[in-house]
Amino acid sequence: MSTLSLSESMYEAIRAHGEETYPHECCGALLGRHGEDGWQVVDAIKAGNMRTDSAHNRYNIAPIELVRIQRSAREKGLEIAGFYHSHPDHPAQWSPTDFAEAHWLGCSYVITSVAKGKATVTNSFLLAGKTEEDKRFEQETIQVGNAPGEQSEDLEETTSIKEQR
Ligand SMILES: [Zn+2]
C-alpha cells in the first residue's frame, strides 16, 4: 500500500476548501515529490470547478488552469502528485465518473466527504496501472503531519528558542 504524506495545515486546507464550496464540489491539484512509498505533497492549488451542469457531483479542472498548475509545479521543481475534490453529502469513495475521468497514472486522487457542510472522511486513491486499459484505483494511507518540512523545522525552532532562554 502506498502512502500520501502531507502536513497537517495542507490536509486541513484541502478539507476546508470542501466546506467553503459546499453544497458544490471543490477541486484542486497537489504538487509534490515522489518518495519511496508514495507522494510527499508540498503544495496544494485550488482550482475553480468549471462544471456548471452538475457541480454538486461532478468536478473538472479547466485545461487552462491545468497548464497554470503545471507551470507552477515546474517553477518550484515539483511534480503534479495528484488531485483532490469533495463529495458533498456522499461517502469519500470514488465514483464511476471519477474513475472514467482519471487519467493521471501514478497520481493520487484525494476525496473528502463533506456532510451538511462539515468535512468528515478524507481518503486517497492511487491510480495504479501501466495503461488506461489496465488502470485501477488503490486506496492508500494518508500520513498527516510527519512530512519532513515545516513541522519538524517548527519543532526545531521551538527547541532552540527554549534553549536560548
Ligand atoms: Zn468524485
Image: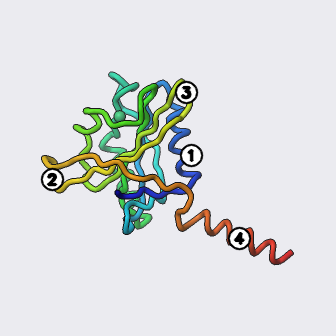
**At label 3, which amino acid type do we have?**
Gly
**How far across and how far down the image is residue 16, in percent?**
55, 39
Name which of mark 4 and mark 3 comes first in the sequence.
3
Q: Residues within 10 Å of mark 1 (few under 14, many from 20)?
A: few
Q: Say whether marks 2 and 3 touch (CB < 8 Å).
A: no
Query: Which residue in the protein does label 1 denote?
Result: 12
Q: Residues within 10 Å of mark 2 (few under 14, many from 20)?
A: few
Instruction: Please tell me whether residue 52 is drawn above or below residue 94 in the rendered image.
Output: above
Name which of mark 2 and mark 3 comes first in the sequence.
3
**At label 1, which amino acid type do we have?**
Glu
Instruction: Please tell me whether residue 15 is drawn above or below residue 4 in the rendered image.
Output: above
The image's mark for residue 131 is 2
**How far across and how far down the image is residue 87, in percent?**
42, 31
The image's mark for residue 157 is 4
Res. 48 in view: no
**Residue furthest toward the left?**
133
Q: Say whether marks 1 and 4 touch (CB < 8 Å).
A: no
The image's mark for residue 97 is none
Determine the secondary structure under disc 3.
loop
Q: Residues within 10 Å of mark 3 (few under 14, many from 20)?
A: some
**At label 4, which amino acid type do we have?**
Glu
Q: CA distance from mark 2 to mark 3?
A: 37 Å
**Residue furthest toward the bottom?**
164
Query: Which residue in the protein does label 3 denote?
Result: 117
* Residue 115 in the figure: left or right of residue 27: right
Name which of mark 1 and mark 4 comes first in the sequence.
1
Q: CA distance from mark 3 to mark 1?
A: 14 Å
The residue positioned 17% from the left and 56% from the top of the image is 130
User: For the residue with label 2, is its CB less than 8 Å from the closest atom of ligand 1?
Assistant: no
The residue positioned 51% from the left and 27% from the top of the image is 115
